[in-house]
Image (cartoon, coloured by chain):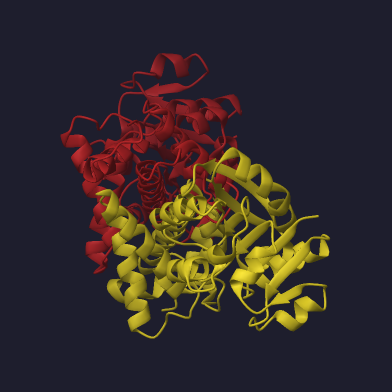
Chain colours: A yellow, B red
Amino acid sequence: MTTIGFIGLGIMGKPMATHLARAGHDLHISNASGAAAELKGLGARGHDSLSDLAAACEVVILMVPDTPEVESVLFGDDGVVAGLAPGTLVIDMSSIDPIATRDFAGRVRAAGGDYVDAPVSGGEVGAKAATLTIMAGGSAEGFARALPLFKVMGGNITHIGDVGAGQTCKVANQIIVALNIAAVGEALIFASKAGADPARVREALLGGFASSKVLEVHGERMIERNFDPGFRMDLHLKDLSLALQGAEALGLSLPQTAFCKQLLASAREAGEGDLDHSAMVRQLERLAGHSLAD
Amino acid sequence: MTTIGFIGLGIMGKPMATHLARAGHDLHISNASGAAAELKGLGARGHDSLSDLAAACEVVILMVPDTPEVESVLFGDDGVVAGLAPGTLVIDMSSIDPIATRDFAGRVRAAGGDYVDAPVSGGEVGAKAATLTIMAGGSAEGFARALPLFKVMGGNITHIGDVGAGQTCKVANQIIVALNIAAVGEALIFASKAGADPARVREALLGGFASSKVLEVHGERMIERNFDPGFRMDLHLKDLSLALQGAEALGLSLPQTAFCKQLLASAREAGEGDLDHSAMVRQLERLAGHSLAD
């Protein structure tokens, strides 16, 4: 049994924390959380400040929206670091900037703690089913301490490398998913405009070298025009922004990622940011002047 | 048993024709073919002209490099159409222009024949193992006549739609494969430049939404720097040129396909056109100023 503080009890964090509580861990949460009452029903103990919460815990897990939230949770007044006991392990499971992650880890270590970044993929469904893919960065010791907790929340768990490598891997994941969605969209638009049935084309391609999880899942959504999220375009836009900020800091050119970011940004401008990311096909359809639905 | 003329006994065509002969069909070939002696050893009968060959056959199969070769085989002096008996089925298994395909089919039908386009994917390995993916366009009757022969040469066989739909599907396949290669390349370059091991990243991503046949096969080639073909970049350049010519004729914009065509064209200019198409990563590495091998 580990004493775990869990910060960020949203769509993803609440089921993840619930799994930890049900597995018998001693869960600590913020009284300010909207999900506090529900988790207290599972035995979680509430705290009025994040520094108090941190002071009570061996491990503190973060699952918050973006880089600035991680920074303020860790380093704000009465934040985690203000209460950190020596040897406490901070595990950031949010999806944030890999470069900022290294900075945060350095400051947590300077305060006597350890740091593992461990973003996930698999979405709300994976969080609820405890089948998340977890991509971790950190020391061998930090990863070994975190691993039993990861196993409660996820399935496919990989230690990629040093601190930041988990976030880097997550960014790579989001680059490939976005670009594969755009690839499938462009190919199906071509096939449809040339007079072939995109549903038959998708079916024929599923067995061969063009096959992908995206052709299977997002290709079907494009054909059925089912754009209920799923994963919202605005969140994918955030992830590609992270990729491009990172690339700029590294002096790297990512031309296709930049193009897909423009598609997602124009979707947001068109008021479609809340649709599933498979709706990137709608932006390509506007560029092409032809829709799969025509 | 069907009397089959097979034109184009190259790397793909020779094993395909061999399977048909071994399955007991009456195979007819051109005496001019380099593989003529070998196939005659399996009982094939040689002809001095394509019109004589066509006159002797119920079905004529083409497996030649590109659109101009199909046109000259069919409509040249002493070509297939010059000898075509009424009711003969022409099956073009080459990968060529979908729009030209419709024109060719119209001219073959006007001469009293029928026409099915049936390009394949799976390469030399699939041709030898008789596991080719076959994407067919044509009438229901034409497809029904061709199907028993397809089953001798391939596995995953789909009737996509009317004449041209097979070629359209093949173009869509080549668009997705090229764009997925470029997506995996860009993501692995980012991960590597940010300090993560691309091999670990690929491994972590194989289970999730970023997974694809390309991440599996071509991603491994990129990491191992194994660029022996496989499928040569010059051939993929031809396929994306077909896609973009088709798009232009249809009044369609395919921005990512255009970008990938530029990558393949600059690979050819760099003298790398004979490498496997996974070597597109090398062009992205030049743009990025960072190599996975660094």
In this rendering, is residue B292 above or below B158? above
Give me the residue at 59% from left, 60% from top.
Answer: A84
Residue B102 in view in this figure: no
Expressed as whole percent of the image width and height from the top left, the position of residue A60 reads 63, 61
Residue B12 shown left or right of residue B233 in the figure: right
Judge whether B23 appears above or below A146 on screen. Answer: above
Which of the two residues, B267 or A168, is positioned nearer the viewer here? A168
Q: Position of residue B229 (x, y in %)?
A: 38, 28
Residue A4: quarter of image: bottom right
Quadrant placement of the N terminus of chain B: top right
- Seen at 42% across and 42% down, the residue is B93
**Picture mark count:** 0
Name which quarter of the figure residue A91 lies in. Answer: bottom right
Q: Quadrant of residue A39?
A: bottom right
Residue at x 51%, y 25% (from the top left corner)? B18
**Is A284 placed above or below B184 here?**
below
**Quadrant for the C terminus of chain B in the image:** top left
Is residue A164 in view? yes
Residue B131 in percent (x, y) is at 57, 36
* Position of residue A166 in the picture relative to residue A9 (left or right): left
Relative to A125, is B49 on the left or the right?
left
Of A95 and A129, the residue lying toward us: A95
Which of A62 and A232 lies nearest the eye of the viewer? A62
Residue A112 placement (x, y as % from top left): 55, 51
Name the residue at the left extreme: B269
